[in-house]
Image (spheres, grey):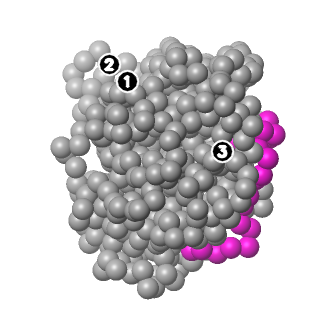
Amino acid sequence: MKHYLKEIFILLYLLANFDLVIERITQLGISFGLLAYIVLYTLFVLGIFSVANIKNNAVRFSIAVLFALSSALFDAYQNTTSEFLTYNTFISLKNAQGFAGEAFEQYLIPIVKSFSFAALLFIGMVLTPRKLKNSFDKYLFSAPLVIFTVFTLLLYVRGAEGGRGLPTGYVFLGYQTLYLYEESINTIGEREEIKISRSNSSINHDIILIIDESVASNYLDINNVSEVTTGLAHSYDNINIYNYGHAASITNCSAESNYTLRYGGTRKNYQKINATMPSIWQYAKAANLQTIYIDAQRTNGHLQNKMDENELHHIDQFIQFDNVDIIDRDMAASEKLIELINDDNHDFIILNKMGAHFPVHDKFPDEFMKYEPSLTRGNFVNIGDTGSRDGFSGDASSWEKYRNSYRNTLLWNVNEFFRRLFTQADLNNAVILYTSDHGQDLHENNDTGLNTHCSAEPRMQEGQVPLVILEAKTLSTLDWSASLLKNHNSSSHYNIFPTLLRLMAYDKSEIQSNYGISLEQDTNDDLTFNIKFHARLGADPVWKKIKLNKN
């Protein structure tokens, strides 16, 4: 038996994921695709055994580390989300890799499990191989390289599709190779200067875009009277509130939605526009507005959501709250926003709120615990984005508690935020657009897994966000009332950038030809969000329809 330890360890690793092989065979059925899959899977396994029998210890060890680590990372995602890691999601994860530490804390158990299985592969590959004829050495060196090259070319031709059910180390390395290739040939173009004309009229008020975090429109009273009070459903003597109902987000992940909101990408041309057109900050500065970015999520100057130093150059004030507890970040943001609204300056402000990203156990004070039973409190006090899911089984009872904690968080970070804004800010000096970066699937339909958003195969709730405009009755900017009825439940994030430019007095027809329709027009939006934002290598984006009658 000891003579076959290498083979035993490798086979144990392969068996650990063999349910995915069975699933893939079932999906393909009796077809040519099944034959191609079996051939490819067999070649992959032969490639692994070829590496395991390379005599050169340094080479064998190096490849084993690479394969095992790649397998562990890929399997960690699958074990956490119960979903296959697509190339689109792979790119999204790379955009969020600065928060890998928090993710490790949140998903510690499935990550440890994945690395444990990968250790079987590593051990099997590094154990000293049995003696083979010298003539086989050159084949052992070349076999995995040839197989990997063929597979990567296959991924390229198929738009990064075709890795399901295959040994995951190969798939992860294939994705990474494609990513590096795309980055090396990125010739989409340089960023342009502003070309859209604007009137000479001065702007005598603030223009504010509030982007909440993980707030689902179906959990707010403005769209469902039985849900969480927000203050946005009330009538006020001095403020008009225009509720555009359920709107579609750009995508179901934070970075891509925020990035596109700042650069104005359209459904038909978001990749080129995001990469080459001016940012909203540049348009605001050209309109003689001071530019201010309030980030209630990160600290110590850390940039997120694909913001870089070049973009930061166009921001006059960059505000974070380094010494403020997570639970108080949105209140600190409201205090700062009130201060900016009440001063005599005319600003363009984007506020990224802390909102209701998981974990939601401790994002609200005790006195805001209206909805019970809720999740156990006290273990996630200073965790903004992620935290260990120890004790959270994902069953129906757990999700009931999760949804109640989520509602309590909304009471604090949405309702209380706006209560302070309404009572302390001079809103005669501001126009405010409010939305969220994406929605949430809180497993209302008994879904499997622990994901709430960023799913590769999302539920429609992940792209369902609020869209509200607040404007003083003394202001007269755009005619919101003219198309509000038609635009209710028929608008999206894609209408926000054109609306901001219209508020900055840029030419309406030029905006429409470059960026699409603003909220003052009939939007007739598709109410879809992009679940394949990183559609590359000739692949097309994939759009998920929000069907409101299925809420």
Q: Nearer the viewer, residue 130 or 267?
A: 267
Label 3 with label 1: CB-CB less than 8 Å: no
Q: Which residue is mark 3?
A: 204
Residue 249 seen anywhere in this rendered image of the structure: yes
Residue 45 in the image: x percent, y percent? 49, 32
Q: Nearer the viewer, mark 2 or mark 3?
A: 3
Q: CA distance from mark 1 to mark 2?
A: 6 Å
Label 1 with label 2: CB-CB less than 8 Å: yes
Q: Residue at x 29, y 54 (%)?
A: 223
Query: Is residue 436 toward the left or the right of residue 347 in the image?
Result: left
User: Where are the magenta residues, as a range?
Assistant: 306-330
The answer to whether 182 is drawn above or below residue 258 in the figure is above
Which circle's residue, 2 or 3, is located before the other in the chain? Answer: 2
Residue 540's disc number? none
* Mark 2 element type: helix
Q: Residue at x 57, y 70 (%)?
A: 424
Q: Say few, some or many: other residues with alpha carbon within 10 Å of mark 3 (under 14 / 14 to 19 / 20 or more).
A: some
* Mark 3 element type: loop
Q: CA distance from mark 2 to mark 3?
A: 63 Å
The answer to whether 444 is drawn above or below residue 201 in the figure is below
Q: Residue at x 56, y 55 (%)?
A: 428
Q: Which residue is mark 2?
A: 33
Q: Which residue is mark 1?
A: 37
* Mark 1 element type: helix
Which amino acid lies under the numbered mark 1 shown in the image of this protein?
Tyr
Residue 145 in the image: x percent, y percent? 64, 23
Q: Residue at x 23, y 65 (%)?
A: 226
Residue 15 in the image: x percent, y percent? 40, 46
Q: Nearer the viewer, residue 95 or 14?
A: 95
Which amino acid lies under the numbered mark 3 shown in the image of this protein?
Asn
Q: Nearer the viewer, residue 113 or 58?
A: 113
